[in-house]
Structure formats: C-alpha cells, structure tokens
Image (spheres, rainbow, N blue to C red):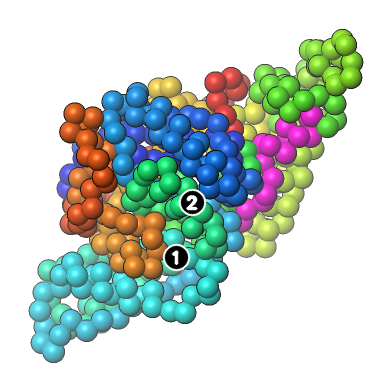
Amino acid sequence: MDTSGMYVGLDIGTTSIKVIVAEYLEGQLNVLGVGNERSAGLSRGVIVDIDKASEAIKNAVKSAEEKASIEIHDVVVGISANMLKIEPVNGLVAIGDQAREITDQDVRDVAAAAIIQNLPPEREIINLIPDEFVVDGFDGIKDPRSMVGVRLEMHGMLFTGPKTIVHNTKKAVEQAGLNPQLAVVSPIAQGLSILSDGEQDFGTILLDLGGGQTTAAVIHDHRLKYAEVDPEGGDYITKDISVVLNTSIENAEKLKRNYGYADATRAAEDNQFPVDVVGQSRPTEITEQYLAEIIEARLSQIFDKLKGQLAATNALSLPGGIVVTGGVAALPGIVDLLKADFDDVPVRVAIPDQMGLRHPSFTQALSLVNYRGQLNEIDLLVQSALAGNQQLVSQIAKKPAPTPKAQSQTEPQQAATATEKRNKQAPKKRGQGLKKFFSDFFD
C-alpha cells in the first residue's frame, strides 16, 4: 500500500512551539519546512492563555510556511499526558439478519459503539486504538472489511484526558486559523516513532524531558500502558540556577545551555566562567562543576519521584530500559545520571537523524508527522468515529493537509474520507550519540 502524503506536526511545548512540514514518499520521510518559535501562554505543559498561545502558534506556522513554500491548514497536534486515563473498551454491532460483506460504515459503527459510555463531564476522549476485530466469533482480525458476517465486535483501548487541556489546545489551534485534523496523546506518537519494534514489544520506559514538565510513559506490547507527568522540567532547572547564583532568568538559561552538565562528576572543577550577579558591578566567577551540582540536584529530584511511581508498575524491569528525549536530554551526562539514579537500567538518548533537526527537542514534532504517516485505513476509520465525541478530529482527508501556495484554498478542506490505504512500515528513527549544543534551540 502507498504511504505517500504531506503532513504537518504541531508540538505545543511550554518553552517552544515547533511546526514540521514533512512529505512521505514510499514510506520515506522528507522534511520540507520547520518553524521553531518561543512559546507564550503555557505553564507546565498546559495552555493557560489561549490568546497568547494562538499567537505563538501563528508565528511558528508562518515560519514553517515560508520555508516549505506552502500554506498550512490542517495539523496533527500532540496532547500532553497530564491526568491521562487508559481503559479497555469493547463494541458490538449487528451487520444484519443475514450475512453480508462488512463495510467502512460498519467499522465506524462498531468503533462508535465501543465509546458509548457516560464519561465524567470533566473528561474528553483523545484517542481510540483498535486491538482486534471479531467477526461471528472469529477473533484476531485486523481488517474485517469485505468479510462476510452477521455480527462485528471490536476490542480496543480508549485514552481520555481532562476536558480543559483538550479544549484549550483545540481552541488555541483553531484561533490560529488552523484545523486540528488529528489529535494524539504525545507518548503514543513518540513510542511509535522512536522505539524499535523490539522495544515496543518487550517493554520500554519513554522519558520526555521537556521545558515545562517531565513525562514518563511505559510502552509494552506495542501499546501505551502507563503515563505519569511530573510538573517540573527544564524551566525549573533554569529557575534554580537563577536563584542560587542570583542572576537573571535569561543569564541562567544561557549558562545552562553553554556550560551545563546533568552529571556533576562529568563537569570540570577547574573550568571557570563569569556570571552577571544582580546588584554587583562585576561578574562573579563560578566553576563548571558548581553549576552542574545545581542542575543535577533538580534532575535527581525529578527522577526520584518518577522512579517510585515506575517501580510500582514493575516498569523498571522491562528489557527496553529507558529511552530519553526532549530538550533537557541534550544536557551532557544525562545518560550517566539516569543510570546512576535508576540503578544501571539501560539508557539511550533518542535524537532525530534528519539534517538540521538533530536535537532531542525536535523529537515530538517529528513523531507527530511519523504517527500520521503510519496510520492505516482502519486506524483512520476508527479515529473518525470520534468526530462526534472529540472535536479535535474534524476531518480525515484523503489529500494531505498543506497545499502549495499556487493552489491554496481560503478555507480548510471540509470533505473528509477515511479510505486511504496505508501500511505501517515507516522507518523508525533512532538517536545515535549525544551532542553538547544548546544555542539556536529551545528546550
């Protein structure tokens, strides 16, 4: 099956907003344009000011449009795993009194039947992922269409989040003039994109070290089984540096990027650099090791809290160990610190291998594009059944989201279809090594 298409990933982070326009040609990802702008209106991974957030999204989208020479209408947007609830669901529909071939509409109907429930008013459906279909008692079916039967069942996993988070994300995207074509829980997209088949199968902890929060997710049997969010991230490290050294937030951020180490044992004790201190006319000299001790203290505090929660789920014994990504993962020594704090669990850093995007802060935006490109027709049909319950999925279009400027439309394309044939063999992207560079990137 063909996997060609052009898609736009929108990563709304606390520190930065990233937009990536990419094209799939025969399963190969080709990045056409990137927008990377400083965030506004977010706190600890959640939108708290829709107006400011939408303006920042506009700026990032405009930058990506200029580089890709296209107009962006539809986007795939990531939803944070804050207070995420994961539960199994089952749907059952009668095909008819007599056996007939199962159609696309039957698949939509059984998916809709699986989500008929009394959700609490404060929660919203984000994703529904099918595990298998059952036709007249025959299970293990991945695509029941064209099969003959009188009864169709679907077993899947339902992902719901706080209505406030989902609504604010949707509203900010729409206010920026965009159509949130598809929403996905961020760790689901990351797990599918940056973990190998074996890591997804046997079990791996995915650790996303962002600017506003840290997310630990457990991927096992190719499914997101658990997610925990700690409301501390790179911004807290910057604030610690600012308070301890009595310097501005701007200076603290530069110090973290230019001289920071996650593991104090990796930093040089005799390497000194100047720090502008508030209230002093002359800079104060501090050592690289002292700065690293400040950074390590905050990171170890975050890791210790997550370790206890992960241990309670037996995730620390999974063969895949820990795969870490996010802007803070670029700190030198992060692997050593994680191994020390998590008792020598295997650790690797996931870094995109696309030219110009080889920094872990771009992993999420690329994962969103990868996720959309790897969805097959059944996935799209099932997800489209959420349209009546989850407003972020407003269309599953046959044609790709962005259109060339010469053929752009004034309104997003409204005609939707979910009958595009896709396979799930898009290549996995794995990071190789760790580079010490922070300039020109946001966490």
* Above-or-below relation of 39 to 139: above
Can residue 235 be found in the magenta stretch? yes
Regarding mark 2 in the picture, which secondary structure is present there?
Answer: helix
Per the image, the residue denoted by label 2 is: 169
**Residue 8 screen position, x and y as percent:** 35, 39
**Residue 221 screen position, x and y as percent:** 44, 59
User: Dot 2, crowdedness within 10 Å: few (<14), some or many (≥20)?
Assistant: many
Rounded to the nearest whole Å, what is the CA distance between mark 2 and mark 1?
13 Å
Q: Is residue 264 visible?
A: no
Q: Nearer the viewer, residue 267 or 370?
A: 370
Quick check: 442 left or right of 112? right
Query: Going by the picture, which residue comes out furthest to the right?
Result: 280
Identity of the residue drawn at 69% across and 45% down: 232
* Above-or-below relation of 417 to 178: below
Residue 125's disc is 1
- Residue type at mark 1: give it: Ile
Magenta segment, which residues? 226-242
Tell me which numbered mark, 2 or 1, is placed earlier along the sequence: 1
